[in-house]
Image: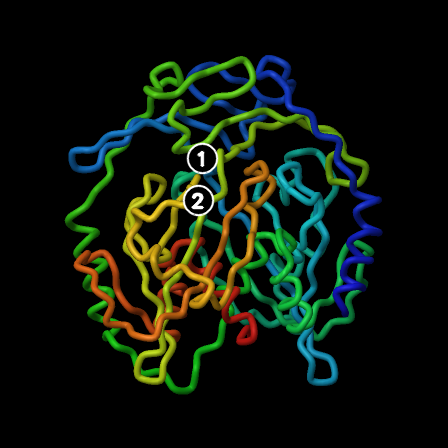
Amino acid sequence: MSIAKINNWLRVNKENSKLKIKKIDFNKSIQWKFNNKKISHIKKSFFYIQAFKFKKERTSWFQPLIIQNESGILGIVKKKSKNIDYYLLQAKNEPGNIKGLQISPTVQATKSNYLRKHGGKKTEYLNFFKKKNKKNKVLSKSLLSEQGTRFLEKFNYNILIETKKNIYRRNNFYWFTKKDLKKALNKKNLLNMDTISVLSSIIKKNRFDSPLNSFNSIKKKLNFFKKKYKISKKKIDFRSLKGWKIDKNKIYDLKKKFFSVIFLEVKALKREVRNWDQPIISDFKKSINCIITCNIKNTSHYLLKIALEPGLKTPRFTATICERNFAINSKKLPFMKYVTKKNSKLDIIYSDEGGRFYKNETRNIISLIPNYKISFSNIKYVWVSHNQMIELIKKNLVSIEARNLFGSYNIDKIK
C-alpha cells in the first residue's frame, strides 16, 4: 500500500470517526469525581490519579501518577501471503491524538475496556489474543512497562500472533507490509506509540553480534543501581502537592517541569462508547528521546542510561538522552553535542498514546558517532549491542522510550 493509499484510507476513516472534544471544569464531569484524595471513575474501574511525595537520596519532589491496576493488551495479528508479511492495524481516534486518527495495533485495550465495563461494544479481534486456536501461533508475548514518569507500575502485554485463518477485515483496519510500516514511521505522529511498542518487542537478532560488554556485566551494573538507589513514595492529598496549583479546570506544577491534569468531554460517532468525559495528562513542551549509536567491532551498539523512575520499583535502561518538557537549545545535558544533523540517522516526531495523554509530542533521534571512546565518567551509561538490546527488552529491562526508538530504527528487522 502506497503512502497515497494509506492517506486515502485514513481520510475515509477520519470522516467516520470524528470526535468532538471540549475542555471542561472538574465539577462538570459526570463520570469522574475529584475528592482531594484522588481523581477516580464512579464505577471504580479504568484508572485513577493519585498524588504522591517522592524521595530519592537527599532530593524530594511532589507529583501525581496514573494508577491502573490491570494489564492491557497491545496485540498485532500477522499473516503471510505469497511470502510477504502483513500486519493488521487499525485507524483509531483518541481524544489526545494530535492528528485525530493514528495507526494503532489490531487490539489496543485495557482489561476494563475489553471486559466492556464501559457498557460499549466488544473489542474487535480480541479472540486472537484471548482464545487458543490451532491456526494461530504466538510469535512473541512480553509484559512490558509503560512510562514510569506518568504511571505507577503499569504494564501491558505486547503480543504478535501469526494466523492462517481467513479474516474479515473491517473498514477501519488494514493489512500493512514492512515497507508500509517504514513509510508510516517516517510520517509525523502517524503510528501511535503502542504500535511502535509492539514492533520494538519483535525485532530479530543479527546473525553476527560481537558485544563490547558481556551481558552479565551489563546486568551487574543494573543490579548495582537497584541496591544503591531507591525511591520512597507516600500517598498524599492533592492539596498537599507542594509546587502545584489546583484551578477549577486543571492541576499543574508551577515550574512546568512535569505536566497538567485536565478534563475532557468527548462525543464520538463510531466508538465502543458514544459519550464520555475523562481526565488526561498534558505536557508543557515537546520532549526529547535520543540514543547515541556506534558501530563497534562490526556490531551496532547503543549507549543506554540507567534510570530510576518514580512509577517503577526498579531501575531500567533508557535512552542516552530522555527528557520531558525539553528546551531543545539546552546544551547542559550530557551528549547533547552529538545531536547534530551530520550524526542523525533518525529524527522524527511521535506522540504519546492519546487515551491518557493530550497532544504530548516527543522528538525521537538516533545519532551515529564514529568513535565509541567518547569521554564520559558517569557510571550510569553503558554500551549495549543489538542482540543484547533485544534480550534486555524481553526481560522488561528497557524503558518504553528507549525500546520504541530502537524499534523505529530497526523496523526492517521485525518478525
Q: Are marks 2 and 1 in contact (CB under 8 Å)?
A: yes
The quarter of the picture where the C terminus appears is: bottom right
- Residue 224, position as x, y percentages in the image: 17, 56
Quarter residue 248 falls in: top right
Q: Is residue 58 above or below residue 206?
A: above
Task: Check disc 1 and report its element: helix, strand or loop.
Answer: strand
Rendered view: 224 above or below 16: below
In the displayed structure image, the side of residue 116 where residue 377 appears, left or right: left
Residue that appears at 55% across and 38% down: 357
Q: Position of residue 98 (x, y in %)?
A: 64, 42
Residue 153 location in percent, x, y? 39, 43
Q: Which residue occupies 49% across, 29% down? A: 48
The image quadrant of residue 276 is: top right
User: Which residue is at the front of the view, 351 or 387?
Assistant: 351
**Mark 2 surroundings within 10 Å by alpha-carbon count, few (fewer than 14), some (14 through 19), many (20 or more):** many
* Location of mark 1 (residue): 67
| Other residues around mark 1 within 10 Å, as few (<14) / some (14–19) / many (≥20) | some
Q: Residue furthest bottom?
A: 208
Residue 154's place in the image compared with 208, above or below, is above
Q: Hey, which quadrant is residue 2 in on the image?
A: bottom right
The residue where tag 2 is placed is 154
The kind of secondary structure element at disc 2 is loop
Which amino acid, by three-letter code, is at mark 2? Lys
> How many labels sit on residues?
2
Looking at the rendered structure, the kind of residue marked 1 is: Ile
Question: Is residue 229 found left or right of 105 in the rendered image?
Answer: left
Question: Measuring 64% from the left and 19% from the top, which residue is drawn there?
Answer: 24
Q: Residue 202 placed where, x, y %?
A: 51, 69
Identified at 66% across, 73% down, the residue is 179
Judge from the rendering whether residue 3 lies leftward or rightward of residue 69; answer left or right: right
Tell me the quadrant of the picture where the N terminus can be found: bottom right
Q: In this image, 95 relative to 342: left or right?
A: right
